[in-house]
Image (cartoon, rainbow, N blue to C red):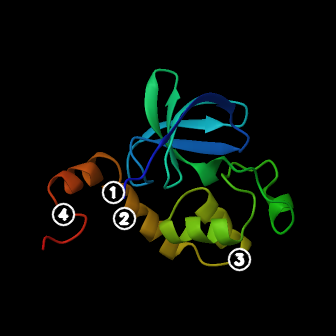
Amino acid sequence: MCAATVLAAEMITVKVPVLDVWTRKGSMFGKVATLKDGDSLQIIEKQPDGWMRVTVGEKEGYVKDTALLPPKSGGFAEAFKGMNVGRADASDASASMAARGIEPGARFYVNARNYRTDGLDEMMSARDAVAGPRFEEFIKQGNVGPAPK
């Protein structure tokens, strides 16, 4: 079975406070750009896994479709107003960001819950030490992915 991609080529305006564009699919890869509310990007291709290939200026990268969703109302939404976070709810999305150590949602999540931040700080430090080019080199060496059969 072959998964088809949808070519879109549409310009959109960012409607979330912060949107990261990644070099490849995943937040462990380097960033192409960080956009804010009101910035524009062009969607080149929508893929079945929820990732979209986009361009920002002359640069090409990837954005997860859910990262473009505006903040949910209710819950912690009011607490997030005016803050530099990708999603405005400290529920499932923020918990997920916290689990992966993604700033600034992770930081807000632990603060909103009055959790200690030392574990998050340690996790973020470890993540930052391997994210981007070091992670990509790790992949090239064949150290990530399914085990050979």
Say what amino acid the circle numbered 1 marks: Ala
| Mark 4 or mark 1, whichever is nearer to me | 4
In terms of depth relative to the viewer, which is nearer, 105 or 74?
Answer: 74
In terms of depth relative to the viewer, which is nearer, 85 or 51?
Answer: 51
Q: Earlier in the sequence, mark 4 or mark 1?
A: 1
- Decide: marks 1, 2 in contact (CB < 8 A)? yes
Q: Estimate how packed mark 2 is, as few (under 14), some (14 to 19) or many (20 or more) residues with alpha carbons within 10 Å.
A: few
Q: Residue at x 53, y 53 (%)?
A: 50
Q: Estimate how packed mark 3 is, as few (under 14), some (14 to 19) or many (20 or more) residues with alpha carbons within 10 Å.
A: few
Q: Residue at x 59, y 49 (%)?
A: 65
Q: How many marks?
A: 4
Q: Residue at x 71, y 77 (%)?
A: 113
Q: Quadrant of residue 112?
A: bottom right
Query: Distance from label 1 to label 2 (Cα)?
Result: 5 Å
Q: Quadrant of residue 31?
A: top left
Q: Secondary structure at mark 2?
A: helix
Q: Quadrant of residue 11?
A: top right
Instruction: Locate residue 144 relative to residue 110 in the image: left or right.
Output: left
Which residue is denoted by mark 1 in the rendering? 129
Q: Residue at x 21, y 56 (%)?
A: 138
Which residue is denoted by mark 4 in the rendering? 143
Query: Distance from label 4 to label 3 (Cα)?
Result: 36 Å
Say what amino acid the circle numbered 2 marks: Ala
Which residue is denoted by mark 2 in the rendering? 126
